[in-house]
Image (cartoon, grey):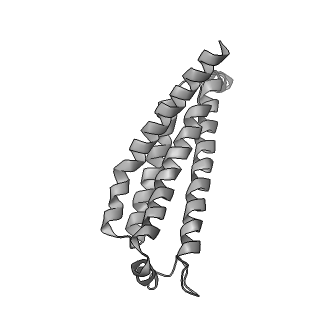
C-alpha cells in the first residue's frame, strides 16, 4: 500500500498542480466577468417584480421583452467568461497554456449549452456555441504572445 501511495505522489508533478490551480482561477475569473456583464444587462433591462430565473412560466415572457442589445450583452458575458477565464488559465500555466485555455473554453461551452437549453433564448444566440472555443483559443494565443514578449524584455 505504501508503495502504491508513493508511486502516486511521484506522478503528481508541481506543473500538474499549477495547471489545476490555473484552471480553477481561470474559471473564477471568467465567472466574475460573466456575472458582471449579466448584472449590467439586468440593470439595463430589469426583470419584472417578483420574477426569478427559476420561474419557468414568467421567464419566456421576460426574455421576449428584452431587446437584441440585452442579448448582445449576455452574449458578450458568456464569451467573456471563456476569453478572460482562458486568458488567466493560459497565463498561469507554465507548460500548457493552450490546453488550459481550451479546458476553460470547453467548461464554458458545456455551461452555455445547458443555459441555452434551460432558458428561452432567441435562436440566434446559438451562434455563441462555437465561439466559446474560438475565444479561448485566441486568449491562449494572446497569453503565449504576452509570455514571449515578457521573456524577451527581461532577457
In this view, 75 is above or below 137: below
Which quadrant would residue 23 be assigned to in this image?
top right
Quadrant placement of the N terminus: top right
Q: In the rendering, at what x and y percent does residue 106 appear? A: 44, 46
Residue at (40% x, 44% y) in the render: 133
Q: Quadrant of the C terminus?
A: top right
Q: Is residue 74 above or below residue 9?
A: below
**What percent of the width, then of the height, locates residue 71?**
43, 67
> Nearest the camera: 53 or 8?
53
Residue placed furthest toward the left: 123
Q: Nearer the viewer, residue 105 or 64?
A: 64
Q: How many marks?
A: 0
* Image quadrant assignment for residue 50: bottom right
Q: Is residue 77 above or below residue 148?
A: below
Which picture quadrant has residue 21?
top right
Q: Nearer the viewer, residue 62 or 154?
A: 154
Q: In the orientation shown, which residue stands out farthest toward the bottom? A: 49
At horizontal 46% and vertical 45% (from top left) the residue drawn is 105
**Rendered location of residue 116, percent (x, y):** 39, 65
Q: Residue visible at 39% across and 80% down?
A: 64
> Where residue 56 appears, x then y in whole percent?
45, 81
> Residue drawn 43% across and 77% down?
63
Amino acid at each position: 500500500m505504501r508503495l502504491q501511495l508513493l508511486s502516486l505522489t511521484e506522478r503528481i508533478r508541481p506543473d500538474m498542480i499549477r495547471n489545476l490551480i490555473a484552471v480553477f482561477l481561470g474559471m473564477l475569473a471568467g465567472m466574475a466577468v460573466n456575472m458582471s456583464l449579466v448584472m449590467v444587462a439586468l440593470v439595463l433591462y430589469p426583470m419584472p417584480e417578483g420574477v426569478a430565473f427559476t420561474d419557468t412560466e414568467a421567464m419566456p415572457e421576460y426574455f421576449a421583452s428584452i431587446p437584441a442589445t440585452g442579448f448582445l450583452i449576455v452574449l458578450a458575458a458568456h464569451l467573456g467568461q471563456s476569453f478572460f477565464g482562458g486568458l488567466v488559465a493560459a497565463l498561469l500555466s507554465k507548460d500548457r497554456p493552450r490546453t488550459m485555455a481550451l479546458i476553460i473554453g470547453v467548461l464554458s461551452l458545456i455551461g452555455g449549452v445547458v443555459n441555452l437549453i434551460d432558458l428561452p433564448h432567441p435562436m440566434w444566440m446559438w451562434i455563441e456555441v462555437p465561439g466559446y472555443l474560438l475565444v479561448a483559443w485566441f486568449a491562449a494565443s494572446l497569453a503565449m504572445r504576452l509570455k514571449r514578449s515578457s521573456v524577451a524584455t527581461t532577457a
